[in-house]
Image: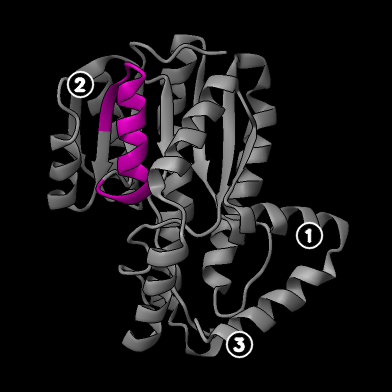
Amino acid sequence: MRSLDKRVAVVTGASSGIGRATAKALAAKGCTLAIADIDETGLAQTANELPGTQHSTHLVDVSDKQRMQAFASEVEQAHGPAHIVINNAGVTVTDKLEDHSLEDFEWIVGINFWGVVYGCKFFLPQLQANGWGAFVNLSSMFGLTGVPKQSSYCATKFAVRGFSESLSIELANENIDVISVHPGGIRTNIVRNSRGADDGKRQRIIDWFDTQGMKPEKAASKIVAAVEHRKQRVVITPEAWATDIIKRLYPSIPRRLAGWAVRKSELV
């Protein structure tokens, strides 16, 4: 079991939701934090919830290659080389492909996939310098199975899953863990900040997440435990667990269930 006390941890998408909760959970373990987001107001609020914790805040668009490279340098200059990198920043689009703009495709791929690649690429030398470390890459339950009107989101989350599994094998002999995280419904702002769905449909999805979703603090505790116990894969929430198991045993069933559930609930 790894001790996280006095380790340097980086968290992207830290202005709310899983990112904020994970930053607070790492702080409770004694980590020094570098928290990043494009939302300056939310990031400041997260910083206010870290009393007594050594930390720095960074305005970062994770889809910007040059900014991410500079961010890695800023963290090392402020705190020394990072040990843990939580690539959490993410967005979603709800739309059928025929209505889905290419601009929105580029937007979601830039944040959800390239943000993870840049986070791993630019911080990897720091983890190597420390002789150990962990990348935690947020995929999704939708990185386990396809869902209608979520083609771009599923594409990015499947990509994060494949990237993480491959990188995990590459770095196995360097004492660096790569953890792929697959949450189901969590009470976050991802839907509020989404594109594609009209306001009525978006509000129905928000209402479901707010009433049925898991609290981000519970998800964060599972993520931090995965770092401590050096897990390679974390599936969070009952619906994600069920999807994972059924997909492996009966691959065609999740496909049929996803289409039926979405039509029945009219979420999308």
Which type of secondary structure does the marked residue at label 3 adopt? helix
Residue at (34%, 40%) from the top-left corner? 21
Q: Nearer the viewer, residue 120 or 207?
A: 207
Residues shaded magenta: 15-34
Which type of secondary structure does the marked residue at label 2 adopt? loop
Residue at (41%, 45%) from the top-left corner? 88
Which type of secondary structure does the marked residue at label 1 adopt? helix
Which residue was labeled with disc 1?
A: 247
Q: CA distance from mark 3 to mark 1?
A: 20 Å
The type of residue carrying mark 3 is Arg
Q: CA distance from mark 2 to mark 1?
A: 42 Å
Figure check: 152 above or below 127: below
The image quarter in which residue 11 lies? top left
Crowding at dot 3, Cα within 10 Å, few <14 / some 14-19 / many 20+, comes out as few
Q: CA distance from mark 2 to mark 3?
A: 46 Å
The image quarter in which residue 229 lies? top right
Ranked by sequence position, the earlier of labels 2 and 1 is 2
Residue at (44%, 11%) from the top-left corner? 129
Q: Where's residue 213, x and y in %?
A: 46, 60
Which residue was labeled with disc 3?
A: 263
Residue 53: mark in rendering: 2
Crowding at dot 2, Cα within 10 Å, few <14 / some 14-19 / many 20+, comes out as some
Residue 134: mark in rendering: none
Ranked by sequence position, the earlier of labels 3 and 1 is 1
Figure check: 263 above or below 246: below
